């Protein structure tokens, strides 16, 4: 996918850490099975987590993935066409 067609993933990790008794980056990292440096990069928006890591981070807060991560499509990205399932019947 061309870089200009990609959307942006945002997260609420820092806010959620502070809502959970000011959880440290190290504690979150341990709960998610990653390094503190990974948490730092995620919070700074320099790293996009894998789907598996996104689920582990969300579960560390007792939340669903969409409550922790958001996705904003690029303005010039074409909209996907829905799959026509009638051909499989």
Image: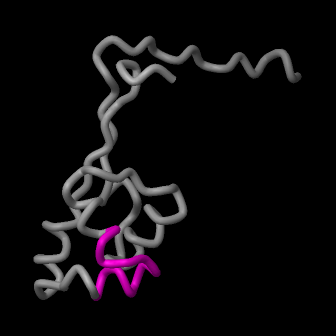
Q: Is residue 65 left or right of residue 1?
A: left
Residue plotted at (35% across, 19% down):
4
Q: Horizontal and vertical percent for residue 63?
A: 35, 69
Q: Which residue is farthest front?
A: 37
Figure colour scheme = one colour
Q: Horizontal and vertical percent for residue 64?
A: 40, 63
In-front residue for pair 35/88: 35
Q: Horizontal and vertical percent for residue 35?
A: 37, 78
Residue 19 occupies which quadrant of the picture?
Answer: bottom left
Q: Is residue 47 left or right of residue 86?
A: left
Residue 29 belongs to magenta span: yes
Residue plotted at (39% across, 15% down):
77
Residue 27 occupies which quadrant of the picture?
Answer: bottom left
Residue plotted at (29% across, 59% down):
42
Q: Is residue 69 left or right of residue 17?
A: right
Residue plotted at (38% across, 68% down):
58
Range of residues picked out in magenta = 27-38
How many numbered discs sit on the rendered protein? 0
Vertical side of 1 occupied by 8: above or below: below
Image quarter where the C terminus lies is top right
Q: Horizontal and vertical percent for residue 60?
A: 37, 79
Main secondary structure type of the part rendered in magenta: helix
Vertical side of 83 occupied by 26: above or below: below
Vertical side of 63 occupied by 83: above or below: above
In-front residue for pair 38/82: 38
Residue 13 occupies which quadrant of the picture?
Answer: bottom left
Residue 68 belongs to magenta span: no
């Amino acid at each position: 996918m061309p870089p200009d067609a990609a959307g942006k993933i945002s997260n609420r990790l820092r806010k959620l850490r502070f809502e959970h008794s000011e959880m440290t980056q190290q504690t979150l990292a341990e709960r998610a099975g990653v390094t503190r440096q990974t948490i730092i990069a995620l919070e700074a928006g320099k790293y996009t987590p894998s789907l598996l890591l996104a689920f582990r981070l969300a579960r560390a807060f007792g939340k669903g993935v969409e409550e922790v991560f958001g996705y904003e499509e690029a303005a010039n990205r074409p909209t996907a066409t829905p799959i026509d399932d009638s051909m499989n019947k």
